Amino acid sequence: MNIFFLGISNMLLYNPIVLITLLVHILSDFQFQSEKISSLKTTKLTYLLKHLIIVGLPLILLVIIFPINITYFLLVWLSHIIIDSMKYSLNTYISKNKLERIAFVIDQIFHICCIVCLYYLVGFNDEKLNSVGNILRLILFFAILGKPINIVFKILFSKYQVVENNSGTIAGAGAIIGVLERYIIGICVLLGQYASIGLIFAAKSVARYNKISENQSFAEYYLIGSLFSIICVLVTHIVLFML
């Protein structure tokens, strides 16, 4: 089936192997690797190899479960090795020209394009999975709304972050709040309860009222984060379920 005629959401629904591979990519590239590996894989070869092993192990597991797609999964892994190795080689140029944000976006676009294009070249659909396509889309939906969005926000908007005394806060609490916020928004969107989304931000605003009212910079950063969360949930929902 041609992706341009079928649409992205239906293409994913009717080709669950692509869904599973995208899910594995999201988990291995964001969820499974530590912050240390993520930050050092572009500068130290040891950490790049650790990252590639983390990416490869789930794909090897998929080879065992779906042996008919052994060529596809191995080529996806090879493409990941090539893309990340190129980024590693170009790291000095990227850092010198402050292109980290652009490099991150291009890197992810290349990974996703390789996963989809390689499937159409050498992949095979497993009809046994057709009945669970919607479940896989839901899992991918919430996987994207978790840690990946936190990392994307940190990379794209770090220059707007307010430096403040965090003695009264719990380390990592803000990231967890962001994830839970997007999960709740995602559930509201899936159920069509769009008006309920306002209640989430009302609750957040009450909890952060003092900081918002006293610190203009924090209020702006807070608004950027809140709007970014809504945009990410809506765009992810449109791509996976409507487009």
Image (tube, helix red, strand yellow):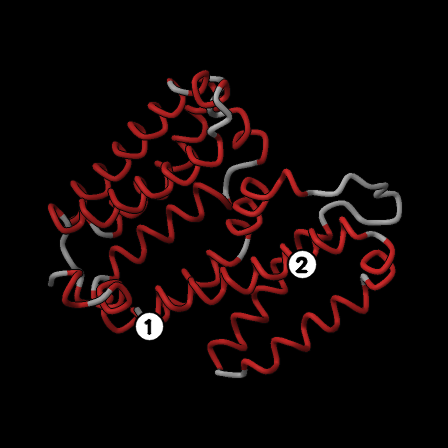
Name the residue rendered at 54%, 42% in the picture.
Answer: 156
Relative height, residue 215 to residue 86 (above, below): below
Report the front residue among 160 and 122. 160
Q: Quadrant of the C terminus?
A: bottom left
Q: CA distance from mark 2 to mark 1?
A: 27 Å
Q: Callout 2: few (<14), some (14-19), or many (20+) C-alpha neighbours within 10 Å?
A: some
Dividing the image into 4 quarters, which one contains the N terminus?
Answer: bottom left
Q: Please give the residue where the numbered disc 1 appears in the rendered image.
A: 242
Residue 182 percent location from the top left of the image: 57, 64
* Residue 203 vertical placement versus 166 (above, below): below
The answer to whether residue 83 is left or right of residue 225 is: left
Say which amino acid is labelled 1. Answer: Met
For image coordinates 49% across by 76% down, the residue present is: 189
Amino acid type assigned to the residue bearing label 2 in the image: Leu
Q: Residues within 10 Å of mark 1 (few under 14, many from 20)?
A: few
Q: Looking at the image, is mark 2 or mark 1 earlier in the sequence?
A: 2
Q: Secondary structure at mark 1?
A: helix
Find disc 2 in the rendering and name its residue: 223
